Image: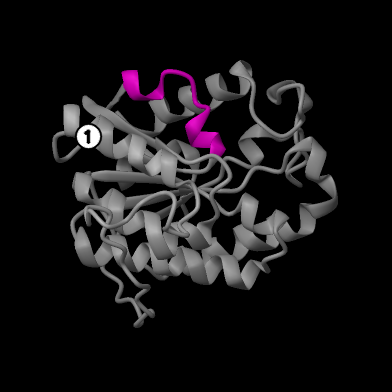
Amino acid sequence: MHKKIYLASLAVILSTGCKKEITDIRQPEIIDFNKSHLRASSHPLPFWDEIMAFQNQDAKAMPKPNGVLFMGSSTIRLWPDLDKKTIAGQPIIKRGIGGAEMSQFATSYAPFLTRYKPKFIFLYAGGNDVLTGKTPEQITAAFDSVYSIVNRKLPTSNIYYLSLKISPKHLNQMDTYKKTNALIKASIDKKPKAFYLDVCNLLAVDTNGTPDPKYYSIDNVHLNMEGYTVLENALRSWVR
């Protein structure tokens, strides 16, 4: 049975889940970030400095288990004061990596970030994959790998995918964004503990996903404060 996940119904979904089985998914290589021989100068991992900043932050105060993890690209990284807020009474762990791709979360970052043992995981990624020429099928396969990592390491945790928004600057890629969203939603519909959240239409002027410019910053790519306020208000209605 396909799950119909809409913005107003997330609060119900958080306490339920789905019993469907998942087919086997190829497991990506897991990188051990704690090995002393890994250095920014010698390791090819993108955004190494940001990962090391997370390491240093955790060394000072490791987040407690059962929190709410937000992981993803610049939409997460630029979210103002996200890590100073709570959702459903649980602290938020903000781990955004500007410029990161879904494929990189699949091969490198997701194994690292699951160490926080969060109860809920919100993921926003895939837009940078589109801009580097990856197909919707490739992006969906990368999402499947991220899901597999989370489901294997944290079988009781829920993962919520925030759909790709279509920014005014990238209207020429609209069909690719929409196909990616559709394929990921179709994949999520078959997975337990996974849910699709339609933020694309939340930030649009019509049901076709056409972006509303008032929600975007001067670069016409990233959200402005009004856009983030819309997302935050939606979160408050989704999770109580």
Horizontal arrangement in the rendering, residue 3 relative to residue 136 (left or right): left
Residue 14 in the image, given as x and y percentages of width and height: 28, 44
Residue carrying label 1: 58
Horizontal arrangement in the rendering, residue 159 relative to residue 218 (left or right): left
Residue 117 covered by magenta stretch: no
- For the N terminus, the image quarter is bottom left
Magenta stretch?
74-85
**Residue 2 in view in this figure:** no
Residue 79 covered by magenta stretch: yes
Q: Residue at x 78, y 52 (%)?
A: 174
- Give the residue type at disc 1: Asp
Q: Which colour style is shown?
A: one colour
Q: Residue at x 47, y 22 (%)?
A: 233
**Residue 170 in view in this figure:** yes
User: Which residue extends farthest left?
Assistant: 64
Q: Is residue 120 placed above or below 147 in the rendered structure?
A: above
Residue 109 in the image, given as x and y percentages of width and height: 38, 54
Q: Quadrant of residue 50?
A: top left
